Image (cartoon, grey):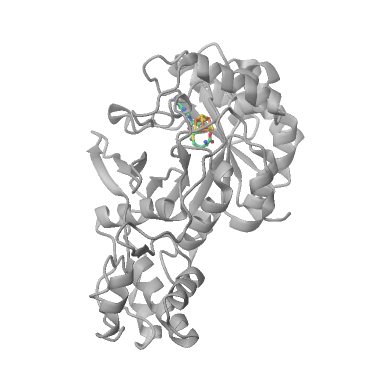
């Protein structure tokens, strides 16, 4: 499939994503923010600013390493770059971060940041520490067009797609906040690269995993999410393995194959229901890409196998999708499509005005047992950060509320757009 696919793809919902600032955009003071750029983009930006080819290549390699491996935010400390060159860089470039509007910590240790883009849009990221890992939940859009009925983010208008810099910026900020940049002398280029690599270790890190499960539908912002995750996975920078990154989609079937091929991360699918009626109601994109089509795309997902299973997310809604029959049908479907699957049962996280309630703990346990008996793992996700509205589906920023009527209209339009 070609790159033009993304722009040609019809977007469900009333609001098409509004144009996004280009990757390489000068700030008001004329300086260009390098955050989120790949090594090649940094090189081209340096060439355009007047460096010859050899210099642009060498400097981009060094600067890339300083930005993503060391967390540098200015050029002063880039010790392997000639002293005279550093002011030249500082006059033309910056290494930015999203602005932090508010940082909150839950009683269970979960942390949530409200962030703001340069043009004033707010979005959120969440860090969930566990005994053996730390997971950063990253947003891909400001708002979401998809209106899943149980999701607070779905009550927001889509304001715009986040840029690669804003997506990578969340990871960089989390690293800043957790104090996780390596110390010591690890410059590249003029320095000894071999010993540099050896000195660096990921052991003992708090941030070990990334999930694209914040605000927005990542596959409706495919190019930017892909470019951002490529930077995050680059071995010379943040160097997070694709096995530690999971992308969650509500079921944007036409983009799933490219997700596997071009990004290669673990896939999570927001299934949430096993019949057309119920899934149409709670995940309206189902009217466009139905359950069969979705499960077939999962069966075809590049790189999925028994060692790398696809996660099926299933929100537990009282008397809506939580019966024994639903559980049995879920097992049947996953087996029918021979899916290397695990099921993640998510107790519904309430928000004000939500039209659903969470299933009882007994019901959730019974549901989980049926799936386990079918030979498929089905742990129940412990809600984290509920007290600061940081749990799944609770993310929402204030500025951009949709009315119920607007949401209903968008859901209807998503259906007819098919
Ligand atoms: N847009 C993507 C990723 C973000 S949502 C998607 O839909 O997959 C991350 C997960 O939280 C999804 O499985 C979503 O369905 C679930 N979720 C949304 N609202 C929720 C709520 N109120 N309670 C529990 N889970 C919710
Ligand atoms: Fe959007 Fe995902 Fe929420 Fe659905 S569950 S409205 S796709 S963020």
Q: Nearer the viewer, residue 362 or 191?
A: 191
Is 10 situated left or right of 220 in this image?
right
Residue in the picture at 74% in, 31% down:
292
Residue in the picture at 49% in, 47% down:
20
Image coordinates for residue 103, horizontal then vertical, percent: 24, 41
Is 324 situated left or right of 36 in this image?
right
Residue in the picture at 25% in, 71% down:
183
* Residue 297 in view (yes/no): yes
Image coordinates for residue 141, horizontal then vertical, percent: 47, 41
Q: Eyeballing the image, is 375 above or below 185?
A: above
Q: Nearer the viewer, residue 276 or 18?
A: 18
For residue 111, which quarter of the picture?
top left
Q: Where the N terminus falls, by quadrant? A: bottom right
* Residue 302 in view (yes/no): no
Q: Where the C terminus falls, by quadrant? A: top right
Image coordinates for residue 294, horizontal then vertical, percent: 70, 35
- What count of labels does the image hold? 0
Q: Eyeballing the image, is 114 above or below 328?
A: below
Is 182 situated left or right of 317 in this image?
left
Q: Nearer the viewer, residue 165 or 111?
A: 165
Image coordinates for residue 401, horizontal then vertical, percent: 40, 24
Q: Eyeballing the image, is 28 above or below 43?
A: above
Is 113 situated left or right of 288 in this image?
left
């Amino acid at each position: 499939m070609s790159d033009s696919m993304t722009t040609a793809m019809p977007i469900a919902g009333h609001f098409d994503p509004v144009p996004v600032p280009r990757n390489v955009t000068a700030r008001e003071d004329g300086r260009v923010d390098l955050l989120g750029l790949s090594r090649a983009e940094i090189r081209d930006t340096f060439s355009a600013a007047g460096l010859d080819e050899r210099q642009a290549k060498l400097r981009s390699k060094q600067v890339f390493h300083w930005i993503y491996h060391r967390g540098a935010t200015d050029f002063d400390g880039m010790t392997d770059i000639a002293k005279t060159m550093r002011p030249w860089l500082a006059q033309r470039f910056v290494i930015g971060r999203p602005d932090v509007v508010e940082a909150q910590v839950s009683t269970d240790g979960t942390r949530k940041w409200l962030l703001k883009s340069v043009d004033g849009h707010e979005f959120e990221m969440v860090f969930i520490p566990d005994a053996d890992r730390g997971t950063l939940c990253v947003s891909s859009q400001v708002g979401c067009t998809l209106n899943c009925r149980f999701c607070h983010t779905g009550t927001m208008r889509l304001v715009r797609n986040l840029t690669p810099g804003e997506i990578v910026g969340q990871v960089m900020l989390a690293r800043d906040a957790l104090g996780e940049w390596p110390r010591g002398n690890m410059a590249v280029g003029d320095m000894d690269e071999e010993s540099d690599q050896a000195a660096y270790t990921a052991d003992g890190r708090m941030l070990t995993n990334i999930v694209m499960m914040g605000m927005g539908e990542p596959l409706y912002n495919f190019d930017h999410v892909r470019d951002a995750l490529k930077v995050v996975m680059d071995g010379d920078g943040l160097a997070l393995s694709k096995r530690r990154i999971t992308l969650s989609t509500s079921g944007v079937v036409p983009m799933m194959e490219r997700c596997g091929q071009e990004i290669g991360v673990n896939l999570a699918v927001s299934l949430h229901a096993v019949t057309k009626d119920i899934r149409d109601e709670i995940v309206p994109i189902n009217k466009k890409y139905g359950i069969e089509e979705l499960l077939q795309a999962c069966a075809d997902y590049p790189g999925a196998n028994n060692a790398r299973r696809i996660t099926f997310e299933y929100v537990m809604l009282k008397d809506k999708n939580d019966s024994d029959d639903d559980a049995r049908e879920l097992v049947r479907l996953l087996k029918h499509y021979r899916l290397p699957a695990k099921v993640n049962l998510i107790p519904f996280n309430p928000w004000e005005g939500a039209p659903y309630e969470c299933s009882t703990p007994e019901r959730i346990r019974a549901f989980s047992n049926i799936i386990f008996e079918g030979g498929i793992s089905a742990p129940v996700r412990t809600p984290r950060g509920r007290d600061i509205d940081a749990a799944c589906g609770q993310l929402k920023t204030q500025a951009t509320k949709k009315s119920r009527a607007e949401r209903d209209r968008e859901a209807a339009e998503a259906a007819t757009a098919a």
